[in-house]
Image (cartoon, helix red, strand yellow):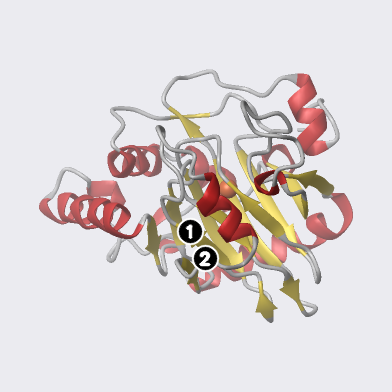
Amino acid sequence: MNVSRDIDLDKYPIHQLDSSIGLELIDRSRSELKTTGVLTLAGFLRRSVVEECVAQLSPIIENESFVHNREHNIYFDDQLDKVAADASVMARMHTTSLTVCGDQITSSVLWDLYQWQPMIEFIAAIVGKDRLYPMDDPLAGLNIKSMRNGDVTNWHFDRSEFTITLLLQQPISGGVFQVRRNLRSDGDPNYAGVEKLLEGEDREVRSFHIEPGTLTVFQGKHSAHRVSPVSGGRRRIVAVFSYFDSPGVRFSDEDRIQFYGRSQVIN
Ligand SMILES: [Fe+2]
C-alpha cells in the first residue's frame, strides 16, 4: 500500500491524528456519527485505487466467493424471551450475498489498509475506544461482500457495536443502505416499532446514497438496517473491516463454516 497514493490524506489526515487538522477531523467525524448515526467519509479511497480494487476482486468474486444464503428474522435469533415464535416481529426474511475472505486477498490495498495502524487508531478515536485491534483471523477480519441482481441484505440489528465498510462499487440500481435509527434501546425492544418497520409503514427510514470510495462507520445495535435489493448487471461490492477492543479475537471453526463454508485458511 502506498498510503498517500491510495487515501486522500489531504481531506482525511488520519496519519496525523495528534495535529490540529487531525483532531479537527476526529471532532467532525464524532459529531456526525452522534448526530446522524452514520458517518460517511466520501472519497476516502481515491477513485483510481477503487477501480484497481474492483479489477483485482472481480474474478475472485466471480470464481472463488462463498454464496451466503440465509433465512433469518430481524434479530438473527429464533427464540426471543417472551415473544411467540409466530409473532409478527419474528417474520422471516431472506439474505443472499457473495463473500470473499481476507485470506484470499493478502496482496491487496484492502488487506494492508485493514491492518494499517493509523487506520485502526482513527476508527478507535471515532467510536470512543482507547485501543482497537484487527481480528486474529485472516478469514473474518476483512470480508468483501458482493450482491448480484436480486440479492438483498434484509433488515437486521447488528451484534457488534460498530461496523466499518468501504464501498467499492454501486449497482445500476437498488443496493441502497437504509437505516431506521434507534428503533430500540437497551431497555426497550420497541416491538410495536419493529412491527411497523417490517410492514413497511415506518416513515423514519433513511436511505444513504453512497459513492464508491466512501468509508462508512455505523453503529447498528439499536438501529435496524438493510441493503435494498440490487437490480441490474453490475454488482454492489463493499469491504467490511472488523475491529475489537481486545486482541486475539477469532471465529470458531463452526462460525467459519457457517459464514464462509470452510474453516481452513487458504494463504
Ligand atoms: Fe449490519
Q: Is there a contact, CB below 8 Å, between mark 2 and mark 1?
A: yes
Q: How many residues crowd mark 2 within 10 Å: few (<14), some (14–19), many (20+)?
A: some
Which one is nearer the viewer's eye here, 48 or 138? 138
The x and y percentages for residue 16 are 23, 48
The residue that label 1 is drawn on is 180
Q: Residue at x 82, y 50 (%)?
A: 65
Q: Nearer the viewer, mark 2 or mark 1?
A: 2
Q: Residue furthest right?
A: 63
- Identified at 67% across, 51% down, the residue is 144
Tell me, yes or no, if residue 266 can be seen here. no
Q: Is residue 241 left or right of residue 17?
A: right
- Residue 202 has which mark? 2
Numbered tag placed on residue 233 in the rendering: none
- The image shows residue 238 at horizontal and vertical percentages of 62, 58
> Residue 251 falls in which quadrant of the image?
top right
Task: Give the Cα separation between the discs numbered 2 and 1.
Answer: 8 Å
Could you tell me which residue is drawn at 62 percent across and 28 percent down?
82
The amino acid type of the residue labelled 1 equals Arg
- What kind of element bears circle 2? loop
- Find residue 70 and report its horizontal and vertical position in percent: 81, 45
Specify whether 46 is left or right of 174.
left
Drawn side of residue 209 relative to residue 123, left or right: right
The amino acid type found where label 2 is placed reads Asp
* Residue at image location 76% in from the left, 77% down from the top: 231
Nearer-the-camera pick, 46 or 236 = 236
